[in-house]
Amino acid sequence: STVVKAYIADMSDRDRLPQVMAYREAAGTLAFIVGPTVGSFLFVLTERLEYIICASGLMSLVSALLVSLRLRGPPATSQRADPAPSARRTNTKDGSSEASADAAAAAAGAEGSQQH
């Protein structure tokens, strides 16, 4: 699915991304081949649809368990600090730049606290 491909792209190194995407496609193709084959063998052996449905559900649960154990979060990234309020500027209609009201209030508060 698109979500899986996006996750793989986010979690893989750029150098290994083509290889990892190829593994994902190969695993999907293998599942499309093996799944119906195993299902048809189960039907020939049991001749009961309930067993095939139970086996399919069981495999889904096993897959979900494996994914939950192997899934990892995104790599840690450095977060940029928000610029100081006095560094924020807004553009006026005439094209000039002036400090925002928040920046002016913060600067006034900082000056007031330094005087004490």
Image (cartoon, grey):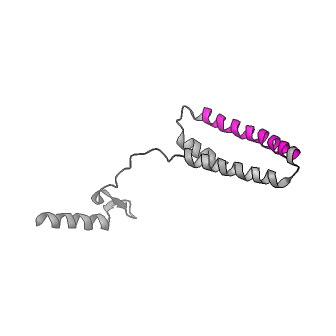
Give the image location of residue 116, x and y in percent.
Answer: 11, 67
Examine the structure image and report whether residue 59 is included in the region drawn in magenta: no
Q: Is residue 2 visible to us here? A: no
Extent of the magenta region: 19-44
For the point 29% across and 63% down, which residue is it?
A: 103
Q: Main secondary structure of the magenta part?
A: helix
Is residue 46 toward the left or the right of residue 70 in the image? right
Furthest residue toward front: 46
Q: Residue at x 61, y 46 (%)?
A: 66
Left or right: residue 59 versus residue 83 is right
Compared with 65, 92 (above or below) is below
x 30%, y 60%: residue: 85
> Looking at the image, which residue sits at the far left?
116
* Image quadrant where residue 90 sits: bottom left
Q: Quadrant of residue 109?
A: bottom left
Left or right of 88? Residue 62 is: right
Residue 105 appears in the picture as rendered: yes
* Placement of 28 over or under 65, stated as above or below: above
> Looking at the image, is 58 positioned above or below residue 90?
above
In magenta stretch: residue 40: yes
Q: Which is nearer the eye, 13 or 44?
A: 44
Q: Relative to 27, is 51 above or below?
A: below
x and y percentages locating residue 26 in the rendered image: 70, 35
- Residue 93: where, in percent of width, then height? 40, 64
Q: Residue at x 54, y 31 (%)?
A: 15
**Residue 84 in picture, x, y percent from top left:** 29, 57
| Callout count | 0
